[in-house]
Amino acid sequence: MSGSLLFQSLVLGVLLGGLNALLAAGLTLYFGVMRVVMIAHSAFLILAAYLAWYFNQQTGLDPLLSLFVTVPLFFVVGIGMQRLLITRLRPATLTMMSVLLTFAIALFIEGMIGFVWSGTQRRIQLPYSGSNIEFFGARIAVVKLIAFGLAAVSLALLYVILKKSRFGQALRATIQHPEAAKLVGVKTDRIAGLGFGLGLATAAVGGTALSLDATIYPSLHWHWIGPLMAIIVVGGLGSIPGTAIAAMVLGIGQSLLQVEIGTTWAQTLFYVALFGTLMLRPQGFFGGRLAQRF
């Protein structure tokens, strides 16, 4: 591999890792707050991508503007989903039953997308879709840069919310020790609903970013759920900093492997990392101390 190709792969790996970190952030929030394995998260990502495509088709405006509608919409849907469905599951079997419940929701969303927009593949065509810029010899697509910028801004906002706001303090307390949080007056049920809504709002942003540079179809969410699960397990369930680090490492690894073994086989890196983590360090490589410091 030549030096220029290696640099190009590293740059693309960083951009891919940043987007993956945003896509996986919601997943780790669900588990951190409620111990819910949200299989339907990637289906909501694809739904947001379809809404961005539909917005562009109907108005001719940039799909990024659809975020003003989809982010609050998904936030409210997340709160409603937590209040009306998740809280009805028995605490003793919450994690296992949440897999079945959200699996059914993913199938429902996939069917609804196919019914409304058919199974035809869709792709957003924008004036800057084919544009590239040069960066120290590496050619970078503008849409990838925009998606990475959107992911970086969203993760920074998420960090500020969780680190600086009273809601963030209550959410972190609920993640770290829900019983102790209740003892000091935190309304953990209300915080869990808001946390679930926040997680689904990240799906709206991630899906819109994904729509800029991807061909979408109703069953695309099954392609994403495996890698996203691998990222949050490697990073440590419930740890957003760990998720970001794992997404970046695996994204760079995938980008480098694509050059040698092709796109399809390079994605097996996520599953190798997942099985390796479960065998060697089931709590994840970055979730322990980082989760407590966050």
Image: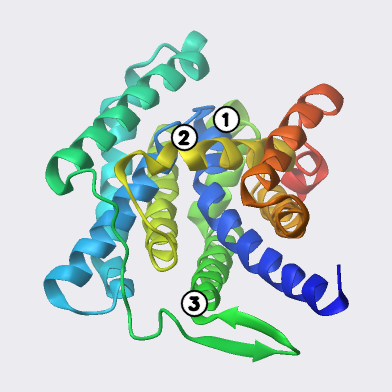
Q: Earlier in the sequence, mark 2 or mark 1?
A: 1
- Name the residue: 53% across, 45% down: 171
Comparing 4 with 254, the one in front is: 4
Kind of residue indicated by mark 2: Thr
Kind of residue indicated by mark 3: Ile
- Name the residue: 14% across, 39% down: 115
Return the x and y of residue 116 as percentages of the image width and height: 13, 45
Left or right for 159, reference 67: right
Residue receiving disc 2: 188
The answer to whether residue 185 shows anywhere in this view is no
Q: Say what secondary structure mark 1 lies in.
A: helix
Residue receiving disc 3: 146
In the rendered image of this protein, does residue 61 appear above or below residue 249? below
Q: Residue 178 carries which label?
A: 1
Q: Distance between the residues labelled 1 and 3?
A: 37 Å
Return the x and y of residue 43 as percentages of the image width and height: 37, 40
- Mark 3 burial class by Cα count in 10 Å: few <14, some 14-19, many 20+: some
The answer to whether residue 74 shows anywhere in this view is yes
Q: Say what secondary structure mark 2 lies in.
A: helix
Residue 56 sits in quarter: bottom left
Q: Distance between the residues labelled 3 and 2?
A: 36 Å
Return the x and y of residue 262 as percentages of the image width and height: 68, 52
- Name the residue: 40% across, 17% down: 100
Kind of residue indicated by mark 1: Pro
In the rendered image of this protein, does residue 249 appear above or below residue 85? below
Left or right for 255, reference 186: right
Asked whether the residues under the numbered discs 2 and 1 touch, taking CB atoms below 8 Å apart as contact, a structural biologist would say yes
